[in-house]
Amino acid sequence: MNLENNGDFSRQYRRSRRTAPVWMLFVIGFCGVLAGALVTCFLLEGMPPSPAGDSPQPPSAAGEAPAELPPPHEEDLAVVEVVSRVMPAVVAVNSYVPGSYFGRSVLMQSGSGSGVIIAEDGYIITNQHVIDGAEQIIVLTADSRSFEATVVGEDQLTDLALLKIEEKALPHASLGDSGTVRAGETVLAAGNPLGFLKHTVTRGIVSALEREVRASQSQYAYTYIQTDAVINRGNSGGPLVNLRGEVVGINSAKISEAEGIGLAIPSNTVKRVADDLREDGRVRRPQMGILIQNLSAHTGDSTDQGVHISEVNPGSPAVAGGLQVGDVIVAVGSREVRYIAQLFDALLSYYPGDTVELTVMRNGRSRTVTVVPGEAEAEQ
């Protein structure tokens, strides 16, 4: 059969292959490999070099150091350094009020915010609304220690409070000069957002300066720093810090109807209030005995600037100094005054009994009036 014939031929063919010399096959194969290598080298040598960056880099040999990464940006290094220095001084502030639990009287947490240690012997600045009405205040430090704090003093008009814990050699932050802060400057907001994200820092810029914020149900108003650094519930009382590591503000509020509008109390206001609370337990404000409003509100023209005197109390320091109804205050000392908040900021540089020089516009003419203010009663 053909199949069988094909089988016999195959066996004969295999036998003939076994008789070929093996060493000859080895020599032929080696020569082929050598010739291929020579041809490849010749072709590669004649090719033009690839443009820089086109060819992949060979992997590093075992034990060889990897290629160096580009150095961090100078501002990033500054931020890291500031965070490492300031964050140990940032604390969580938890407030407790009396409550009932299954018929038992207990203390229940009523609020949570932030604070910053400003002296190594345990003085802490926070917002007044964080500790308002609290029977007990617990401060948690960066190294996970807890302390019961006492209230040295609180001031509702500036929304600031000074606390004290009994501990020494604490890390603390320094209060800078908010008068040198400029719009566009990089700032960091540190605190405990939502009450449990301990020691969070956000980064932004100073968006604007001297935003007028009025105390509720009061003629008092003060200027705030506006920032786009993220501020959330629980950040209240935490520091706003510049890249020199100085506290330039105390974060106090945000505009809930908009994104990226946070407000911080300037550090110069904080300094005055903290000093007064530490010395007297209250803020000693000068009082001239006048009722005032922004000139723009009086005239209805938003471009008008200055503070209009609408009433002068009989027998007040204002009367003794020569102020009159209708006068428009445009400066306190050398500081320009365009609206009420700037007036109260300027007056925080004085104490009751100091001599205050005012520049006023009267009947279209500028004149200087000297007033020696008395002391304002505590206003709630």
Image (tube, rainbow, N blue to C red):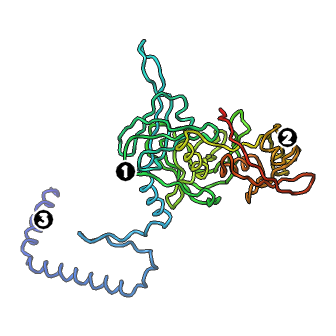
Q: Quadrant of the C terminus?
A: top right
Amino acid type of disc 2?
A: Ser
For residue 228, above or below residue 93? below
Give x and y (percent) for residue 68. 37, 71
Q: Which residue bears the numbered disc 1?
A: 169
- Identify the residue at the far right of this view: 363
Specify which label sits upstream in the sequence, 2 or 1. Answer: 1
| Residue 158: percent from left, percent from top | 62, 41
Given residues 249 and 317, the one toward you in this image is 317
Question: Disc 1 on helix, strand or loop?
Answer: loop
Task: Name the residue: 19% across, 83% down.
Answer: 31
- Rounded to the nearest whole Å, what is the CA distance between mark 1 and mark 3? 102 Å
- Which residue, given by chain and number where applicable, does mark 2 sit on? 310
Q: Amino acid at mark 1?
A: Ala
Q: Report the Cα–Cα distance between label 2 and label 1.
A: 51 Å
Reading the image, the residue beneath label 3 is: 9
Kindly state the secondary structure of the residue where label 2 is placed. strand
Asked which quadrant contains residue 219, the reply is top right
Number of residues whose C-alpha sits closer than 10 Å to that of mark 1, classed few (under 14), some (14–19) or many (20 or more)? few
Residue 184 shows in this picture: no
- Would residue 92 be seen by someone viewing this image from the given angle? yes
Could you tell whether 376 is left or right of 297 in the image?
left
Q: Which sits earlier in the primary sequence, circle 2 or circle 3? A: 3
